[in-house]
Amino acid sequence: MTIETSGGSRIELPPVPPELRSSAVACWSEPLVIDTYMPLAPDSKPAFFEQRVYQGSNGGVFPLPFHERVSRDKAPHAWTAVHLEN
């Protein structure tokens, strides 16, 4: 099955694996390539950086990096997809 997105991309969904076709519900996991706007590198001093008050908060973003921007260009990216059909 092919899905057209509003941005002109196409997503090709895989068919149900042969060993699951006879069951009422099929569930499997496999990679799926989707055009994606990936996050850019995290800012070394994000808006919520230590000792910088913003909306009454001055906490750090530890332990996760703070991504404020995403790429302007989409690129194919392989995601692990869980497919469920009934």
Image (cartoon, rainbow, N blue to C red):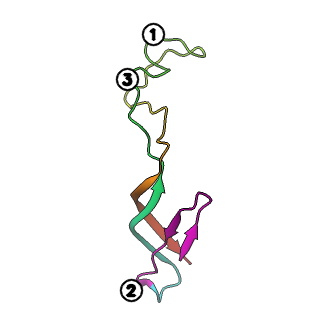
Pointer 1: residues within 10 angstroms few (<14), some, or many (20+)? few
Q: Amino acid at mark 2?
A: Glu
| Segment tinted magenta in the rendering | 1-20
Instruction: Kindly report which numbered mark, 1 or 3, lies closer to the viewer in this rendering.
Output: 3
Residue 82 is situated, as x and y percent measured from the top left of the image, at 45, 65
Q: Could you say whether the residue bearing mark 1 is in a helix, strand or loop?
A: loop
Q: CA distance from mark 1 to mark 2?
A: 58 Å
The dot on residue 19 is 2
Quarter where residue 3 is shown: bottom right
Q: Above or below — where is 25 with respect to 72?
A: below
In contact (CB < 8 Å): disc 2 and disc 3: no
Q: Residues within 10 Å of mark 2 (few under 14, many from 20)?
A: few
Residue 25 higher or lower than 71, as above or below: below
Earlier residue among tags 2 and 3: 2
Check disc 1 and report the residue beneath it. 51
In front of the other: label 1 or label 2? Answer: 1
Question: How many angstroms separate mark 1 from mark 3 (CA)?
Answer: 14 Å
Q: Is residue 5 left or right of residue 77?
A: right
Q: Position of residue 56 (x, y in %)?
A: 59, 14
Q: CA distance from mark 2 to mark 3?
A: 49 Å
Q: Is residue 65 left or right of residue 83?
A: left
* Amino acid type at image mark 1: Gln
Q: Residue at x 37, y 29 (%)?
A: 63
What residue does disc 3 label?
A: 44
